[in-house]
Amino acid sequence: MKRFLFSTAMLLAFVFFSSCLWASEPLWIDVRTADEYVSGHVDGAVNIPYTEITSRIGEVAEDKEAPIYVYCRSGRRSGIALESLQQAGFTNVVNVGGLEDARAKAADAAPE
């Protein structure tokens, strides 16, 4: 019985810590137009144009404290998206800048 309880406790601890690690993965949002997104984007990024960010963020993010990385072509539109998300209560949003900056940051963050 003790082994069963110990095994169960270890399994629950593993699941808990795994979910914490997974939850800390940032959500990448490309705030450019759909045509720009199709021409190239960060792997795993979702496309929500900056003009629609506040009305559509609920489709991809519920936790307002989860990390969100936004990017566009140059950083201007992602700056606007950052401000909109902050006004909507999101507290962990980063303007990564342009697409090339975002690709470099994503490559740096990728596990080896």
Image: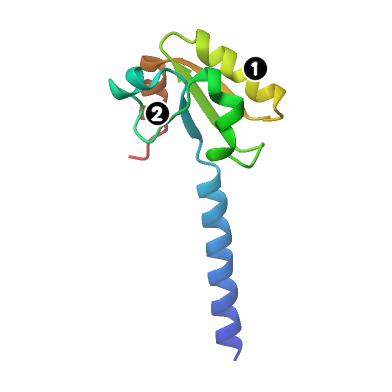
Residue drawn at (56%, 71%) of the image: 10
Q: CA distance from mark 2 to mark 1?
A: 22 Å
Q: Residue 102 location, x and y as percent?
A: 41, 21
Q: Residue 80 location, x and y as percent?
A: 58, 13
Q: Residue 55 location, x and y as percent?
A: 60, 29
Kind of residue at badge 1: Glu
**Disc 2 versus disc 1: nearer the observer:** 1
Q: Secondary structure at mark 2?
A: helix
Of 111 and 103, which appears nearest the observer?
103
The image shows residue 15, relative to residue 56, as above or below, that is below
Left or right placement of residue 90 versus residue 22 in this view: right
Q: Residues within 10 Å of mark 1 (few under 14, many from 20)?
A: some
The reply to whether dot 2 and dot 1 touch (C-beta < 8 Å) is no
Q: Which residue is mark 1?
A: 83
The image shows residue 13, relative to residue 65, as above or below, that is below
The image shows residue 7, relative to residue 39, as above or below, that is below
Residue occupying the far bottom of the picture: 1
Q: Secondary structure at mark 1?
A: helix
Q: Which mark is residue 57?
A: none
Q: Which residue is mark 2?
A: 106
Q: Earlier in the sequence, mark 2 or mark 1?
A: 1
Kind of residue at badge 2: Ala
Residue drawn at (34%, 17%) of the image: 36
